[in-house]
Image: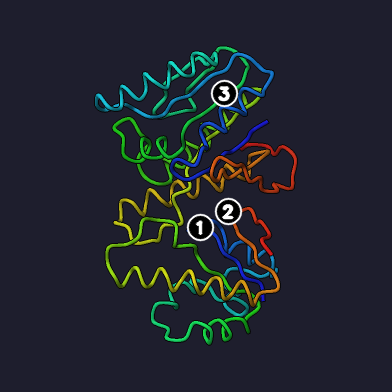
Amino acid sequence: MIFITGPLYSGKREYACALLNCSMDELEQHAVWDVQDLAAACGDLDALADELACRRVVIATEVGGGVVPIDAGERAAREAAGRLSCLLARRAERVVRVFCGLPMVLK
Amino acid sequence: MFTLVIGGAASGKSEYAEGLVLLSPHRPRYYIATMEPFDDEGRARVARHRRMRADKEFQTVERYTNLSALRLPERGTALLECLGNLAANELYGSSGAGGLRGAFSAIVEGVCSLRDQCEDLVVVSNEVFSGGERYAQGTEDYLHLVAEVNRALARHADRLCEVVCGLPQYFDTQRGRPECR
């Protein structure tokens, strides 16, 4: 599994399409994105990471860079999203961060 | 050489970008300022920065919108700071292009026009995209604009670096100097 991360609107899905040689419409056959949104409602992040790791490409948006949210729920969601990314990076054979459309291989 | 320098708040991006300009052999040095001062705090900030740059022999050019109309008197090195302000001015300012499409074109074409008038160009932009996505609609438009401008300019730039804690991380642009338009 290739794990792609990066800031909001940085071109992660476009990069995945280039990597998989597919169109944006075909991307969902091979990849799953916005997985940071799955973390909050999930009781078992390890199990979620295992399940996601079966896909060829997993994409998450970095959401941990701002000020700690006042709302407890948002705080927990952000925490879970960050932890999920770490778990995915551990399972991935390659980790790429896309920044302004340009990839940097982290692992 | 066109270098795009991106960083978060207080990441050291401005100082690093200034350093790049000082390394360039091409004179004169222009500083293209995009922040319009609205109050005493803003004016004091601008005055202090102008004094600091005068020591480094920068000529300050204030330009809040419509970068394409700017003509530099000589071919030298320019530092444009910053795209975050320019984006806000083009999107919301009274003299701005207004609207996402118009603002996007004004900025990208403006930067390309500037690049064509310089030997070396350094553009500073802002990393504001990793703090979540719960924003009001107006902010969402602004984020989209800055993100699209950053990505478009990253395609045009010879070098892209993200400054983290004052340290530059260079991305592999994997190409020579592309044509602008």
Up-down relation of residue A82 to residue B40 (above or below): below
User: Residue drawn at (46%, 17%), measured in percent from left and top?
Assistant: B60
The residue that label 3 is drawn on is: B78
Secondary structure of the residue carrying tag 3 is strand
Chain of the residue where label 2 is placed in the rendered structure: A
- For residue A30, what is the image quadrant? bottom right
Give the mark nearest the N terminus, 1 or 2.
Answer: 1
Q: Name the disc covering residue A7, or none.
A: 1
User: Residue drawn at (51%, 37%), measured in percent from left and top?
Assistant: B12
Count of marks, rendered view: 3
Q: CA distance from mark 3 to mark 2?
A: 24 Å
- For residue B111, what is the image quadrant? top right
**Image coordinates for residue B136, horizontal then vertical, percent:** 29, 56
Chain of the residue where label 1 is placed in the rendered structure: A
**Image coordinates for residue A42, horizontal then vertical, percent:** 42, 83
Left or right? Give the position of B59 relative to A29. Answer: left
The residue that label 2 is drawn on is: A99
What amino acid is at disc 1?
Pro
User: Residue drawn at (54%, 71%), measured in percent from left and top?
Assistant: A85
Chain of the residue where label 3 is placed in the rendered structure: B
Up-down relation of residue B71 to residue B114 (above or below): above
Mark 1 vs 2: CB contact within 8 A: yes
Up-down relation of residue A101 to residue A14 (above or below): above
Left or right? Give the position of B36 relative to A15. Answer: left
**Same-chain check, marks 1 and 2:** yes
Mark 1 vs 3: CB contact within 8 A: no
